[in-house]
Image: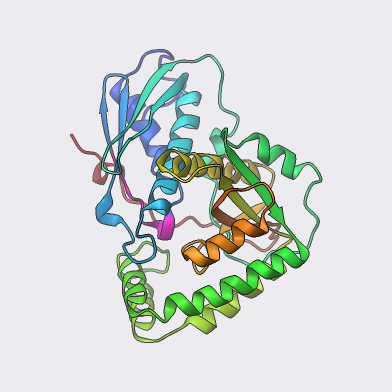
Amino acid sequence: MVNKKESSRGKVNNDMMLSILDYARLAPSSHNTQPWKFSISESKIQILPDLKKALSIADPVHRELFISLGCAISNLEIAANHYGYAINIDHPKQKTDPIRIILEKLKKDAQDFPQLKRRYTDRGKYSQKPLPKDLLKNCRELCKEGIHLELLVDEDKEYIARMVYEGDIIQFNNPQYRKELAYWLRKGVLDGGKISNAVGAFVVSTFNLGKTIGKKELSLILSSPVYAVLGSENDNLVDWINIGISYERIALYLSSIGISNHPMNQGLLELSDHRKRITETCENISYAQFGFRIGYNEKTQRKSSPRFKLNELLVS
């Protein structure tokens, strides 16, 4: 991959674009499905939704898939800024359309570039250590236009935790949901190793673990200082993409100041009734789209989930 010191800023070449994409592929995604393909030509990059990786049970309208694509765009933008380019996004009109990215010269560097390889999802238990007073303000400034962030605490956070518990029971009562989740475990999208993933897939598909997982996730939310909700004014492809861009910007910022985060949409925003109830809980959000807990974890072990290699994601 191209080294920034060795690259000539302002000149778009294949090595530089491949390096940019190598950072884009590190973005978080729903169930770590990594639902993207890439193609490059001259100063243009195309991100193609990989609908073969869509979660037909958990995400039937592909909302989470396009939020994941937004996360990849956020990484791509920061990497492009690092190499001296801004990006211009041509949004898709249909779910099968590619997202076209045009690279343009830029003098500004990217402050969060080092976090692209440091950011990870921390699924551990967070402490009750108070968060910085300016955290909400700083995170809101990172959101795309039309995207809103709310931090839920106390009774609202407990209400969310109870919904997660109920939602996990509802989802795991569905054998097709368990089968879909087991498929991705078997594919090795988590970091447990082949044997551990195979055992996990068998257990998930065979037994109803809704109450067990629900209790665990309820406890994780209650032990966290806040539960964050990202929402939008509308509910379409562009909004979903902008939610992903905004979330990844926030996640990288949190990583830079030593604060952990953990997306928690399973059992919650994947269910239409629960999503509606969350929206009603938030004062300034028309459509709740994405939820995650935030907090400090001094015992954390930085470990990212596996990623597909770049050559597996490139198409001509």
Please tell me whether residue 31 belongs to the stretch shown in magenta: yes
Identity of the residue drawn at 34% across and 61% down: 55
Which residues make up the magenta segment? 30-37
Q: Position of residue 39 (x, y in %)?
A: 25, 33
Q: Quadrant of residue 8?
A: top left
Please tell me whether residue 83 belongs to the stretch shown in magenta: no
Identity of the residue drawn at 42% across and 20% down: 6
Q: Position of residue 259 (x, y in %)?
A: 68, 51
Q: Position of residue 54 (x, y in %)?
A: 31, 56
Q: Quadrant of residue 292?
A: bottom right
Residue 264 seen from this side: no
Residue 132 or residue 282, whichever sits in front: 282
Residue 234 or residue 145, whichever sits in front: 234
Residue 232 or residue 293, whichever sits in front: 232
Residue 152 or residue 38, whichever sits in front: 152
The quadrant of the picture occupied by the N terminus is top left
Residue 103 seen from this side: yes
